[in-house]
Structures are given as C-alpha cells and as structure tokens.
Amino acid sequence: MPDLLGDFSFTWPFYLGAVLAYLLGSIPFGVVLTRLAGLGDIRRIGSGNIGATNVLRTGSKKLAAATLVLDLAKGAAAVLIAKTYGPDMAVFAAMGVVLGHCFPVWLKFKGGKGVSTGIGVYLALDPLLGAATIATWLVVVFVSRYSSLAALLAYLAAPVFAWWLVDPQTMELTLVIGALIYLRHRDNIKRLIFGEESKVSFKKSE
C-alpha cells in the first residue's frame, strides 16, 4: 500500500482512481429508475433511502431488483477496472465507490447505505468472499425478514471470510467498509433494539 502522504508524483494515480470510483459510485440508480418509472422521488418514500430495499417499498420488485443489480454492478466495475492497475489501486477504488454511493455529490452527499455496492466490491475482489457475504445476507433476511439486520450481520462476518479466504489487506478493507456500513445503519440499529424496524415483505407485487 502506498504512503498516502508520500511523493505526490507517485501517489496521484491512486487518488485519481479513488475519485473516478467515487463518481461512479455517486450515480443514484434508485433515484433515476423510480423517476423514469413515474414513481416520483424515492427519497420521499418509506425510509427515504435510495437503495433497493426502499425501492421495494414502491411495490415494484422489478425496479428493486434493477436497483440492486446496478448498485452492485458499479461496485464490481470500479474494482475490476482498478485491479488491472494492481491490488493497491483496487483498494482505493473500493473505498471510493462505496463512499460515492453513501455520499453522492449529485444528491448533496445524502446517499444510500452502501450494502449492495459493497457486495459488488467484495465479489470483484474475490468471488468467494462476495458469495459468502451474500449467503449470510440471504439466510438472515429470509429467517428474520429484516434487511438491515441481514446487512449488519453479513458485514460483520465479511472480515472473517476475508481473513480465511483472501489476505490481510482485504480483511482490513472489509473492516473499514464494515465500519462505514454500521455508521450508515445507526438509525436502523436503534429501531432494531426497540423493535420498531420495518420488515421486508415477500408478498407478490408488480
């Protein structure tokens, strides 16, 4: 990993990679898709979040699925492109794209919680790491029907998966991303504690 405070003539490509990944991560697919579908501003629906779980609250599983796939894809794309320039560049891109989703410049830095984009990052870093994280999320969400709890437990388990399946640098990255995910879920954590969190509905919808 390069010294962030080192010679700028050496470090600038890493900063540029992070900025480009941030801009990609800033694309708010949930907002774009719901507006194109004539459903208004997703930020005025349900929790006000721009991610797939809140898009699902519009009643459209198709839009929610599309949002999930696109948010995941931008995380994966940023890392896959960066990996061609080495593992350190991939780390910078991973953080940049997740920060972009959580704090998008286009939405005055009020974005999503980073779950789908982070999973896309994990899949691109190592398919087994991504698959293990997704499996954890799926098991918890189907058992508890709490999307937020599923995300919290999946990202809690991710560093263990990374340590076991990949390498120490990836484990450290998952710890940082996991901390950001927990920060973004602080209101959900409070609602879970007090039994006020909304559950995911699996009822058939359009």
Image (cartoon, helix red, strand yellow):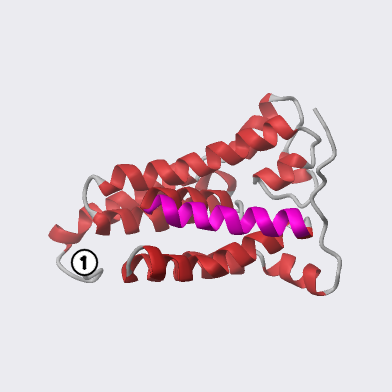
Q: Which residue occupies the foreground of this view, 101 or 179?
A: 179
In this view, 84 is above or below 4: above
Q: Which residue occupies the foreground of this view, 111 or 128?
A: 128
Q: Where in the figure is residue 14, as x and y percent of width and height?
A: 25, 56
Structural crowding at the residue carrying mark 1, measured as other residues with C-alpha within 10 Å and reported as few (<14), some (14–19) or many (≥20) = few
Q: Secondary structure at mark 1?
A: loop
Q: Is residue 163 visible?
A: yes
* Residue at figure coordinates x 43%, y 54% from the top left: 128
Q: Main secondary structure of the magenta part?
A: helix
Instruction: List the residue tagged with mark 1.
Output: 2
Residue positioned most to the top: 37
Is 138 magenta? The answer is yes
Can you say which quadrant of the picture contains the C terminus?
Answer: top right
Can you say which quadrant of the picture contains the N terminus?
Answer: bottom left
Q: Which residues are magenta?
A: 126-143
Q: How many marks?
A: 1
Is 131 magenta? The answer is yes
Q: Where in the figure is residue 202, as x and y percent of width and height?
A: 81, 43
Query: Is 144 displayed left or right of 96 in the figure?
Result: right
Residue positioned most to the bottom: 193
Q: Amino acid at mark 1?
A: Pro
Q: Where in the figure is residue 147, as x and y percent of width and height?
A: 71, 55
* Residue at figure coordinates x 56%, y 49% from the top left: 116
Query: Is 157 displayed left or right of 141 in the figure?
Result: left
Q: Quadrant of residue 137?
A: bottom right
* Residue at figure coordinates x 53%, y 57% from the top left: 133
Q: Where in the figure is residue 94, as x and y percent of width and height?
A: 39, 55
Q: Is residue 118 visible?
A: no
Q: Which residue occupies the foreground of this view, 144 or 105?
A: 144
